[in-house]
Image (cartoon, rainbow, N blue to C red):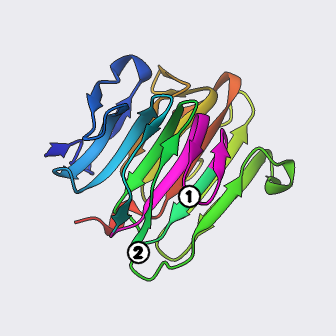
Amino acid sequence: MLINADFSRVVVVSPHQYAWVASPQPGVERVMLDRIGAEQARATSIVRYAPGSVFPRHAHPGGEEILVLSGMFSDESRDFPEGWYLRNPPDSAHTPASREGALIFVKLRQMASDETQPVRIDTRDPAAWRRQGERAVCPLYASVHEQVCLQQVAPGTVLFPDAVDGAELLVLEGALVLDGQACTRGTWIRLPAGRYPALAAAQQGATFYLKTGHLPQLD
């Protein structure tokens, strides 16, 4: 299965374009944002857990990255409410579930093989944020392979004043504008290498997930 598998193209998926697809487990469904492979795939998805749903214990050979967008996501270790960021390294395993329901952003099989430590960050904790110029930034992960953070920017802020080598964004609050198109909360954007002077925060400002450094390594 190939979904948005051409990484040389700009891709924008807005919430009104979400196409929910059932997973193998009842009560768990997903929006496939990009995908290379069948059920065991390199994938980026929005996943929705119905209240009381449980996914059987399984391993992640290529790792798993999660941002809890709403509700309460859980595994054997603890509960993770909205705002928690998780990285489960390659070959880790867990039994994900949600008692009250949850919406999560998930990336599968996209980690370097030398990543070994789990990451757990509460992005709602003010201590996790820092100022970088005019922006507020919550660092989530950084390595030679990729850089991941949340950013909060003021209205009109141009996100990338200089050329980038590729970027992936998910709008969490407010809105961005890309070439005149409003990208509201829940919009996923993937940008190949290039210049994007028209990508800026809308009049209400924006908070977004940002990953860079990872796309040029794809074949």
Residue located at (30% from left, 38% from top): 32
Q: Amino acid at mark 2?
A: Ala
Q: Residues within 10 Å of mark 2 (few under 14, many from 20)?
A: some
Q: Quadrant of the C terminus?
A: bottom left
Q: Which residue is mark 1?
A: 76
Residue farthest top in this picture? 16
> Is 62 placed left or right of 85 in the picture?
left
SS at badge 1: loop
* Res. 68 image quadrant: top right
Mark 2 and mark 1: span between their CA atoms?
24 Å
Instruction: Give, as a single range, the part of the protein colored magenta.
Output: 61-84
Residue 28 visible in the current orientation = yes
Residue drawn 34% across and 20% down? Answer: 17
**Residue 112 numbered mark, or none:** 2
Depth check: give the residue in front, 199 or 186. Answer: 186
Question: What residue lies at 78% left-to-right and 47% top-to-bottom?
Answer: 136
Q: Residues within 10 Å of mark 1 (few under 14, many from 20)?
A: few
- Residue 184 appears at what percent x and percent y? 54, 22
Q: Name the dominant secondary structure of the magenta segment.
A: strand
Mark nearest the camera among 2 and 1 is 1
